[in-house]
Amino acid sequence: MENVENSAFDMSIVKAYLDNIFSPLATNPQHSVDWQHICNLFKQVVPLLDENAIDEIIGATALHPVPEVRKRMIEVFTPQIDQFPSVQQLLIWCMRDTDEQVALHAIRACASSNSSVFWPELYALLGRDASRVQANQELATMGLREAAARQVLRDVYERGLLSDFEELDPYLAKGTGDNILILKHEVDATDMVYIEAGPFISGLPILYKGVSWFAVDDLFPESTIDLKAFYIDKDPVTNEDYDLFCDQIEENGHLWCHPDETPGKDHRRSTLGDVRVEKNHPVCGVDWYDAFAYASWQGKSLPTALQWEKAARGSNGYLYPWGNNYDSVHVNDADRVYNCEFKSLEALLEAQSSFSSEEPQHFTLSIDELSGNTSPYGVHGMIGNVWEWTRSNYLNNTDIIPHFRALEPAIAMEDWSSWVVVKGGAWSSKAELLLPAYRGRRHLLFRSPDVGFRCVYEA
């Protein structure tokens, strides 16, 4: 295949090529392959194929278990984005990929097309909120793929191609589901911190002016809330801890998984093999179902947003775990990771949306670093480094009740109850978001390199 002649290939050759290149890799996702070389070969082959052959390769790409394959093939097919509807459907599919880097590649590819077919899909990634496209100075916190989608839609909007977002805003269905079940076993609380019962100060004063770039919609007004006693992990779950859990899943099956989980789910984190994360770094690249299953394996659960906030702020409601004055020395944030001080929201969003396997050159830090990032209760690393999953529904702050078994992300996203509160900010966040009171949000099916978790135990 090194020298590609200028003639159309028949389907038998295409199928043979897929069998020789894709099938062996599908059975061994860790197989060492020069993906750039494969990508270059496909770039020569694809322009010579008819639509049936294109569809055949696209089908193999969309269902391939190796994220790097899906990512590289997006690059191959981008030049045909306005020629074949199947290419457009591949990009829409990949926008909702559980691997963040695949989704980012798909979103960037859409920027090369003026086709309106992508607009509703990009809009859905923003939670169907026009203000998240149009806002200049105030914008609620975004994940990496949300930032990329916002950049594409903003360009469409500023060029006058789309003026009315209502046409992209269909009715959002609400559903119901079964109660969450947890498989209990003996809990080891050695590395957990006891949070006593009683009141604590949640939220922020109405007149608080600390969040300048971002809307305050995700900050609840200050109030005093009474909680029952609970234990919380002293440190976030690490990559090493999580990988051990995945070994147990392979050995024992899905004993600890949520009943709503897609059958046969692969729990391996999307950051496995990324040299920028090490075994003692907080785990990232896991979705909500991954975090739930790990917590259940430990006989624990994910914290509510309020439990997490109390553990981070103490009973007196400190603004930050260490006190009321922000100190960048204690955190791993975007300025530290990108080695610059972001002066504008646009610069931050540009950096977030350009995340790749090469940039930034590092992101998470060890859980042993930044010792000053400790709450009044002695809980470590609660802001910066990674956002942390909770079990609270973003829509109403109640416990989430998933009911999305076997649904594609594109369908599940239409239901607002599929969005979950995340807390604490991450390596991709500015200081304005590194407030324990702040509520971020993530879709429960997405794996992002800036989201991890820790567990609680309610005796």
Image (cartoon, rainbow, N blue to C red):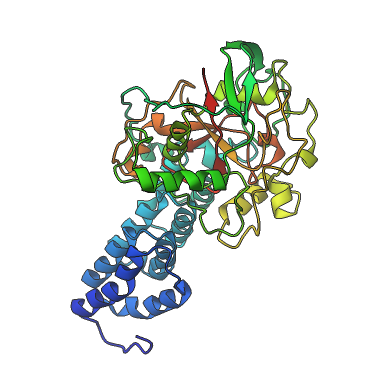
Q: In which quarter of the image is residue 412?
A: top left
In the image, residue 299 sits, relative to residue 119, either above or below, namely above
Q: Which of 330 and 347 is in front in this view?
A: 330
In the image, residue 16 sits, relative to residue 278, either above or below, namely below
In the image, residue 381 sits, relative to residue 51, either above or below, namely above
Q: Which residue is drawn at 67% across and 39% down?
A: 384
Q: Quadrant of residue 357?
A: bottom right
Q: Quadrant of residue 61?
A: bottom left
Residue 157 seen from this side: no
Q: Which of 437 and 385 is in front in this view?
A: 385
Q: Residue at x 40, y 33 (%)?
A: 418
Q: Where is residue 215 in the image (x, y as percent from the top left)?
A: 61, 31
Q: Position of residue 45 (x, y in %)?
A: 34, 79
Residue 240 seen from this side: yes
Count up the numbered dots.
0
Q: Position of residue 64 (x, y in %)?
A: 34, 60
Q: Where is residue 264 in the image (x, y as percent from the top left)?
A: 30, 46
Q: Which of 251 and 364 is in front in this view?
A: 251
Q: Quadrant of the N terminus?
A: bottom left
In the image, residue 395 sits, relative to residue 105, either above or below, namely above
